[in-house]
Amino acid sequence: YRFDFDGSKQTVDGVPKPTGAHSTVIAMRSACPPAGCVATAWDTSIGPTWLQPPEEGALAFRENRDQWVATRWKMFTCNNSMKQGTETLSFQVRPDGTFVGVSTQLEAPCAPIVIPFVATRVGDISPDVQVADPNSA
């Protein structure tokens, strides 16, 4: 899926702070075992990282009442230095198969950043991208 982030609608601490648009491809696999629907994913824009597991590019979305949510550790620039924070991606699936949602980035002591996105399926997962089995997530 290509996640297209609409920077023109970005807010920082609830106040509009437009920025440029950007996109990333997130490879996803999903399953709906009896315990509930899960989608495992890998953000292909994240290269090798020095962080210990859970790795910055790994996501595990869980579905609850038509809302899919995943939170991951992520590195951010905050007050001119690198900080480790969290990013939560949440979305709903539209009838046409696209996702509409928001990214909420929290990196203390900086203010929360919220950016809306739309995600569109762009093809099958590349064989060189490893995505965890959603049945084991």
Image (cartoon, rainbow, N blue to C red):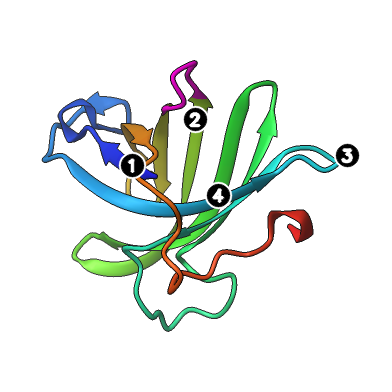
- Examine the structure image and report whether residue 13 is included in the region drawn in magenta: no
Q: Nearer the viewer, residue 47 or 129?
A: 129
Which numbered dot is residue 32?
Answer: none
Tell me the element at label 3.
loop
Q: N-terminal of the two: label 2 or label 1?
A: 1
Pointer 4 and pointer 2: residues touching (CB < 8 Å)?
A: no
User: In which quadrant will I find the C terminus?
Assistant: bottom right
* Mark 1: amino acid: Phe
Relative image position of residue 127 (x, y in whole percent): 46, 70
Q: On the rendered structure, is 103 left or right of 64?
A: left
* Alpha carbon separation for disc pair 3 and 1: 28 Å
- Secondary structure that dominates the magenta span: loop
Q: Which residues make up the magenta segment?
A: 93-98
Q: Nearer the viewer, residue 121 or 93?
A: 121
* Mark 4: amino acid: Thr
Quadrant in the picture for residue 64: top right
Which numbered dot is residue 34?
Answer: 3
* Mark 2: amino acid: Phe
Q: N-terminal of the two: label 1 or label 4?
A: 1
* Mark 3: amino acid: Pro
* Alpha carbon separation for disc pair 1 and 4: 16 Å
Residue 104 in view here = yes
Residue labelled with disc 2: 91
* Crowding at mark 4 (Cα within 10 Å: few <14, some 14-19, many 20+): some
Vertical arrangement, residue 75 with respect to residue 63, above or below: below
Q: Nearer the viewer, mark 1 or mark 4?
A: 1
